[in-house]
Amino acid sequence: MIFDILTIFPDLLESPLNESIIRRAREAGQVRIEITNIRDFAEDKHSMTDDRPFGGGEGMVMKPEPLTAALKSVRGKNEPGRVVLLSPQGRPYSQEVAEELSREKHLILVCGRYEGVDERFIAAAVDDEISIGDYILTGGELAAMVIIDSVTRLLPGVLGCADSAEKDTFSRQLLKHPQYTRPREFAGQEVPEILLSGDHERIENYRFLESVSRTMDRRPDLLQKEEFSKAEIKLLKKHQLYDKVKTLQKEH
Ligand code: 9D3
């Protein structure tokens, strides 16, 4: 997979792309990530990439010509590629969208800044507009990082075998149960006795019930799609959780 990133702040992206799993994937040739500075494609002597909005109003708008020239330069280099604009007006990002993007050969991520991007560039060149959530960032760079991180880990061979089974944490919608490691006592808090018991069935049941309770408390919306087996329903009933789960599933 090839990622091209178009930005006016290339330095902002360097270090997160050179650590940990992304770095390993780059070194193994599983991903190629290239950063292009939009400012290098500004024609005027001040290298202007933004200007005041027609019709007036606050803030600046990214000019279409430098973006178009920057895009042309990465298009010439690699095969066509899907052009994704990161913007607050985009469709919401999710694991499903990450999986969709992971099937592409070449993604071109365009990072907006200022109040936005001239609409004519969007109309002429952008295939897809994505937002990573309902909060205000100062630009698209961190959103591009979120996409690269979440897509790269889905590519074949990037994660070890043990980790790739973990794909299932999102097909099963439940939140993870609490986890503990050594020491057995920390700051006056003990690890739950059951986890030290060696009784694997009781541990499984305990973890399942913890997962369901947490999901009910924190993310009742996730319970909507969840389906429980006969044995799980029996267990939920035994712990007086089943009626509550059913009610939450109807509410969301
Ligand atoms: C309405 C006035 N502006 C807020 C001060 C709107 C606005 C313009 C530009 C808000 C954010 C931005 C910059 N953000 C992005 O480029 C961005 C973003 C985001 O802010 N939230 C979630 N996902 C994304 S993807 C790109």
Image: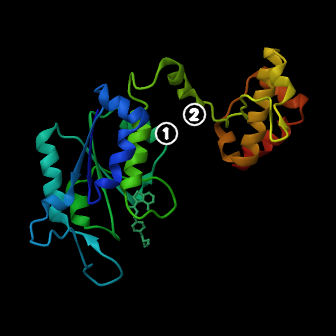
| Residue 189: image location, x then y, percent | 83, 38
Q: Is residue 85 above or below residue 100?
A: below
Q: Answer with the quarter of the image where residue 67 lies.
A: bottom left
Q: Is residue 109 above or below residue 44?
A: above
Q: Nearer the viewer, residue 96 or 175?
A: 175
Q: Quadrant of the N terminus?
A: top left
Q: Is residue 204 above or below residue 68?
A: above
As measured in the structure, the alpha-carbon distance from the residue carrying label 1 to the one carrying label 2 is 8 Å
The residue at 83%/42% (across/down) is 244
Its colouring scheme is rainbow
Q: Residues within 10 Å of mark 2 (few under 14, many from 20)?
A: few
For this view, does 68 lie left or right of residue 86?
left
| Residue 28: image location, x then y, percent | 31, 25
Labelled pair 1, 2 in contact (Cβ < 8 Å): yes
Q: Which residue is mark 2?
A: 170
| Residue 95: image location, x then y, percent | 49, 39
For this view, does 64 lie left or right of residue 196?
left
The residue at 81%/31% (across/down) is 191
Q: Residues within 10 Å of mark 1 (few under 14, many from 20)?
A: some
| Residue 137: image location, x then y, percent | 45, 62
Q: Nearer the viewer, residue 24 or 156?
A: 24
The residue at 34%/77% (across/down) is 59
Amino acid tagged 2: Phe
Label 1 vs 2, first from the N-terminus: 1
Q: Which residue is mark 1?
A: 95
Assign a secondary structure to mark 2: loop
The residue at 36%/46% (across/down) is 15
Ligand 1's image quarter is: bottom left
